[in-house]
């Protein structure tokens, strides 16, 4: 089955600087890679996703890159702001069959320092 | 309007008790899930249902029994609660694309139920 590794587990970044979170996955059949943000005491919410036919995707200050050969993908947040402080989860899934699961990484706690 | 709702939000109970958590989604989605998030924030799928049919059943103790009366509801009943069951339980939903049986990818999570077993 799929295994998703996420690093670092904790990341502190000065406000205004960039943050990068990296994930690797094991199942070459995975073709869908979402990123979820979970603020303290709240539910996880999708912030961006990428499919295997795309190498990079950007949405304002957030970008995700995917290297299928190396089986790794990364989240980049530029010009970080206090409201970016949260736990971020990467995930991977083939999503071709009904019983395909979305496997989450263990999360990265991002602290934006004033 | 709340897209995915869960009740109760907090649940404090004694070991050995039986409890239920309810989930409802008003998004018209076909697929619903239960996830468990432990104290280390690790999110792990427990079950998924598609149109009231059990699709995913992870290695979960059989004390946990999901029930889907219709595609908008997925409840979770837990028998003989143990200390290790303490966690946040999230319900989620997503939409099947239908013909190909492939799910639309975005999972919409409920607000979570914080279960504490004493």
Image: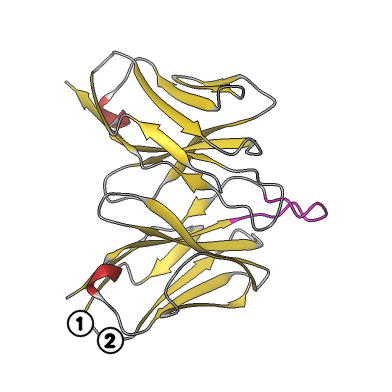
Marks 1 and 2 in Cβ contact (< 8 Å): yes
Quarter assignment of residue A53: top right
Which scheme is used to colour this image of the protein?
A: secondary structure
Q: How many marks?
A: 2
Q: Chain of mark 1?
A: B
**Percent position (x, y) of residue B5?**
45, 64
**Percent position (x, y) of residue B4?**
49, 60
Q: Residue at x 62, y 61 (%)?
A: B31
Judging depth in this view, the residue of B3 and B96 nearest the camera is B96
Left or right of B88: which side holds B74? right
Judging depth in this view, the residue of B12 and A30 nearest the camera is A30
Left or right of A104: which side holds A39? left
Element class at badge 2: loop
Point out the stretch of residues depicted in magenta: B94-103
Q: Chain of mark 2?
A: B
Residue carrying label 2:
B17
Which class describes the residues within 10 Å of circle 1: few (<14), some (14-19), or many (20+)?
A: few
Instruction: In the rendered view, tell whether residue A43 sits above or below residue B35.
Output: above
Residue carrying label 1:
B14
Magenta part mainly helix, strand or loop?
Answer: loop
Q: Residue at x 71, y 53 (%)?
A: A97
**Percent position (x, y) of residue A11?**
26, 27
Task: Quarter of the image for the C terminus of chain B: give it.
Answer: bottom left
Q: CA distance from mark 1 to mark 2?
A: 6 Å
Quarter assignment of residue B35: bottom left
Element class at badge 1: loop
Whether the magenta-drawn stretch holds residue B37 is answered as: no
Judging depth in this view, the residue of B32 and A114 nearest the camera is B32
Judging depth in this view, the residue of B23 and B115 nearest the camera is B115
């Amino acid at each position: 089955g799929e295994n998703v590794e996420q690093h670092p587990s904790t990341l502190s970044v000065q406000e205004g600087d960039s943050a990068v979170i990296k994930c690797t996955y094991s199942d070459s059949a995975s073709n869908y890679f979402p990123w979820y943000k979970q603020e303290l005491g709240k539910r996880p919410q999708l912030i961006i996703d990428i499919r295997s036919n795309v190498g990079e995707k950007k949405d304002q200050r957030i970008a995700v890159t995917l290297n299928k050969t190396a089986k790794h993908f990364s989240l980049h947040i530029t010009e970080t702001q206090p409201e970016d402080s949260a736990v971020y989860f990467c995930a991977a899934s083939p999503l071709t069959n009904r019983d395909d699961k979305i496997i989450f990484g263990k999360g990265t706690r991002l602290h934006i320092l004033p | 309007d709340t897209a995915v709702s869960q009740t109760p939000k907090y649940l404090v109970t004694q070991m050995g008790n039986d409890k239920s958590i309810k989930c409802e989604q008003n998004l018209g989605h076909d697929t619903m899930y239960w996830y468990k998030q432990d104290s280390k924030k690790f999110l792990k799928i427990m079950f998924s249902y598609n149109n009231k049919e059990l699709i995913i059943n992870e290695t979960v103790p059989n004390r946990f029994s999901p029930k889907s009366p219709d595609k908008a509801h997925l409840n979770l009943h837990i028998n003989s609660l143990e200390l290790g069951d303490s966690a946040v339980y999230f319900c989620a939903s997503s939409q099947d694309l239908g013909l190909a049986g492939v799910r639309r990818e975005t999972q919409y999570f409920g607000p979570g139920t914080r279960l504490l077993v004493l």
